[in-house]
Image (cartoon, coloured by chain):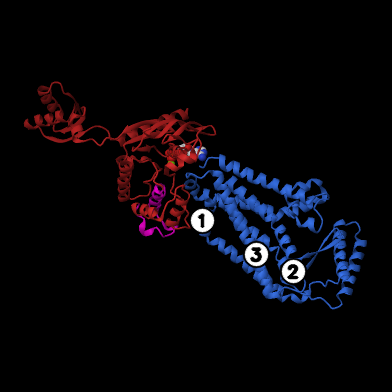
Chain colours: A red, B blue
Amino acid sequence: MSLGIQLKNVTKKIGSNTIIDQLSLDIHKGEVVGLLGPNGAGKTTTIRMMVGLMKMTSGDILIDGLSVSEKRSATAQKLGAIVENPDFYSYMSGLDNLRYFAKLQDKKIGRQTIDEVVSIVGLTESIKKKVKTYSLGMKQRLGLAQSLLHRPKVLILDEPTNGLDPAGIREFREYIRRLAGEQNMTIVVSSHLLSEIELMCDRVAIIQNGRLVRTETIKETSDQENLVKPSSQVVMELADSSKAEQILQEKLPTLETQSRGQRELLIQADKETTAKVIHLLAVQDHPIYRVRDSQQSLEDRFLEITDEKGEAYADAHSQ
Amino acid sequence: MLTLIRNEWFKLRKKPSIYLMAIIIVLLVIATGMIGKVTEDAHSVPDNWKEDLAAKSEQLKEENQEHANNPILTENNRNLIAVNDYRIEHDIKPGSQLSVWSYTVENVPLISVAGLLVMIIAAGIVSGEFSGGTIKLMMIRPAARWKVLLAKYLTVLTYGLLLVVLLLLASLAVGIILFGTGDSMIHLTVNNGVVSEENVLVYLLRYFFFSTIDLWMMVSLAFALSAIFRNTAVSLGVSLFAYLMGGTFTSLLAERFDWTKYLLFANTDLNRYVSGTPFVEGMTMTFSIVMLFLYLAVFLGTAFMTFTKRDIA
Ligand SMILES: Nc1ncnc2c1ncn2[C@@H]1O[C@H](COP(=O)(O)OP(=O)(O)O)[C@@H](O)[C@H]1O
Ligand SMILES: [Mg+2]
């Protein structure tokens, strides 16, 4: 069994509202998956069902092969989580909070483990202070600490980057990558901001109105891959697009070109072809101001997807 | 289970309010002790106490003739007369002064104060986890929900027991220091005009324990409401209202309706079956104990059902 988490047709209805609709997703061991969606998409609800706080209306969730609805206690031992806000007992110190949650775990967790986790999340200095004096970022760190105490196989974190400063997000990202890589931990991280989790995820699952819209694999493309990567659309900014098009059609008749306005030329080309194009124009003394990949960023696509659906949703409801 | 209870205590111990509550109890005991000391003369007994008691009995008999249509009053007076007769006959002088025993008995109303304080803890122990959001981090861990709830209930009960025992011990300590042990260890218990002698300590402990029963019931109610509504204010408000008004309402109803005997507050005072009269004629101690357990089962049953079934959102 190489799946860390398996969501099988998970549906949650509250009253007559369908909050999560037939959501299926397989997450491999050692994989970091981002749950991405605008506010109210159903990320937290999905997470609540994964950790057994909410029962699903239909479908099932398997954690490391065990059903949450049948074996909640066993799945609970396998996972660590933050759900919604990192809420703690504010009248106790961070350390006492951790000691308390450590005792709620079935296995014995020593002081040494606690200290270790505290230093990993960078709270050693303030761990003896009362939680009511903590900033949101510090509470997020404490939240991560409590989720790691028992060395879980599966980590589920709801909006963990909320309240972290950029340096904190970077640290967090590196740590998450390390957990997945070194300890083969299965990790789910939710966020409504792609930029905050894009770099730590292997894959993002985009959720909208309780439905899984699509999953996107995030490739850290190596140079080698880049060269053989199938052609993509490239935008060139030039002195005169129609003249450049002429030159290129002469020398590279198979090249697909399209001028857009006076100064922009779109070509369909892989990297090597692009290099050739630049060379051809340069030797003809044709000025090239800029060359860029016109492929949309994931962010753009995310916004596009959620916008479209949002509008479609709004339309459907205004009729 | 023990671990879970210890964990609840771990959190409770960090709350300043539970120490404040203990201090309130001790201060109140000291205060009643002072008041008792200042007004001590009122309790002094004359040398010719036998004539004094006989005269009082005569008065009571006259009163009974005048109010022959008031069964509660006449019953009560008859019991007083029986005690007086017993004292005269067996040469048992009434407690000459306030002793630690009579003083502690006089402190029994303070149990209501302890009850109030324990209800505050009971009303918050489940709903506080919801309003603080900590219930999530608690319930994603392996312990079953019913075990967590049971641990919380037992924690509230142990805290209540501690406060009640503190009240008892503080009363005994203050009583011994201020009033001494008195000259008689005999308590006269009267039931239906029949007088019996009892060790005063046995009497005291039973009376004290029986007087805490409505405390346990109301604490259980506050706890159950806390688990059902997940709202501290609602559970405290409702249970406090019941605690303060329940007895009065039940007394009013008892005069008119027979079914009052099924109401909770008609059954909480078991002292009535040892000395005194039941709320409604025909009620027995067994009946009341069964009723108490039925109420408890309903409170806790509903609490456990909702707490284990409902989503934690
Ligand atoms: N307890 C609840 N009762 C009714 N509706 C709820 C409840 N919890 C969440 N919802 C609804 O479910 C949807 C998804 O919420 P949530 O999972 O919190 O979204 P996200 O975490 O993605 O922002 C929202 O439209 C919200 O209004
Ligand atoms: Mg959310």
Amino acid type of the residue tagged 3 in the rendering: Leu
Name the element at disc 2. helix
Amino acid type of the residue tagged 1 in the rendering: Lys
Mark 1 → mark 2, Cα distance in angstroms: 38 Å
User: Which quadrant of the figure has residue A237?
Assistant: top left
Mark 3 → mark 2, Cα distance in angstroms: 15 Å
Does A221 sit above or below residue B28? above
Q: Main secondary structure of the magenta part?
A: helix
Determine contact: label 1, label 2, CB under 8 Å. Answer: no
Label 1 or label 3, whichever comes before in sequence order: 1
Q: Residues within 10 Å of mark 1 (few under 14, many from 20)?
A: some
Going 52% across and 59% down the picture, which residue do you hit? B13
The span picked out in magenta is A121-149
Query: Which residue is disc 1 drawn over?
Result: B11
What chain does badge 1 belong to? B
Q: Is mark 2 within 8 Å of ligand 1?
A: no
The one of B70 and B54 positioned closer to us in this rendering: B54
Amino acid type of the residue tagged 2 in the rendering: Ser
Query: Which residue is disc 3 drawn over?
Result: B167
Does A199 sit above or below residue A113? above
The quadrant of the rendering that contains the N terminus of chain A is top left
Label 1 or label 2, whichever comes before in sequence order: 1
Position of B24 with respect to A45 (left or right) is: right
Magenta run includes residue A144: yes
Position of B111 with respect to B306 (left or right) is: right
User: Which quadrant of the figure has residue A153?
Assistant: top left
Query: Which residue is disc 2 drawn over?
Result: B102
